[in-house]
Amino acid sequence: MFFSIILAVLLVDQGTKAAVQMLMYQGESISVLPPVFYLTYIMNPGAAFGILPNQKALFITTGLLLVIGVLAGYRKMPPEKKILRNGLGLVLGGALGNLVDRLRFGRVVDFLDFRVWPVFNLADTAIFIGVCLLAWELLKEGGKTNEGSEH
């Protein structure tokens, strides 16, 4: 399931980005559910929220280290830890989607625009959901280890 999640996230992410690039011009914004949701095509040179713009080498290195770290962590994870495994799959699929953009364009294609948040993409969404799953599972496990102890 882990590798299927990675592949699905990567394919859907790259497919939606390719569609946006074919059907829109940079800076174009299409109203989908005004005033809440728009498709806005931008090329983000930075990380989340556009921080650290034009640090391509840093982001590629970080992305590669993340891939190596997640794969190493996955190998050591017991098979019954399905939520952790799925969370890691979402994080890795999203990281690979954005890494592909950085290698191809030096920037990341973003297009989901809720106007109250910086424009983002499906890879970012997968990373966010994956991190939430990881945090939830780790917090849940942390509560189990503390239940029987006295303070």
Image (cartoon, helix red, strand yellow):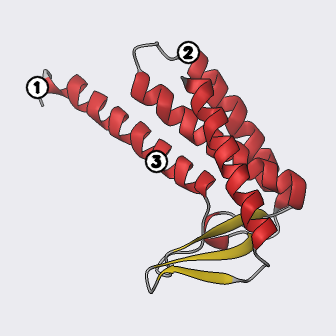
Give the residue at mark 2.
76
Q: Earlier in the sequence, mark 2 or mark 1?
A: 2
Whether residue 84 sits left or right of residue 14 in the image: it is left
Sequence-wise, which precedes: disc 1 or disc 3?
3
- Please state the horizontal and vertical placement of residue 1, each as a whole percent of the image: 54, 22
Q: Quadrant of residue 93?
A: top right
Q: Earlier in the sequence, mark 3 or mark 2?
A: 2
Q: Is residue 40 above or below residue 72?
A: below
> What x and y, as percent, mark residue 65?
73, 38
Q: Residues within 10 Å of mark 1 (few under 14, many from 20)?
A: few
- Which is more toward the observer, 49 or 2? 2
- Closest to the camera, between mark 3 and mark 2, is 3
Q: On the image, numbered disc 1 is attached to which residue?
A: 150
Label 2 – label 1 distance at C-alpha? 30 Å
Task: Give the side of residue 148 with respect to residue 67, left or right.
Answer: left
SS label for mark 3 = helix
**How far is disc 3 from disc 2 in space, using C-alphas?**
22 Å
Query: What is the CA distance from the residue labelled 1 to the residue labelled 3?
Result: 34 Å
Task: Verify CB contact (< 8 Å) between mark 1 and mark 3.
Answer: no
Which residue has dot 3 on it?
129
Q: Is residue 124 above or below residue 7?
A: below
x, y percent for residue 79: 46, 13
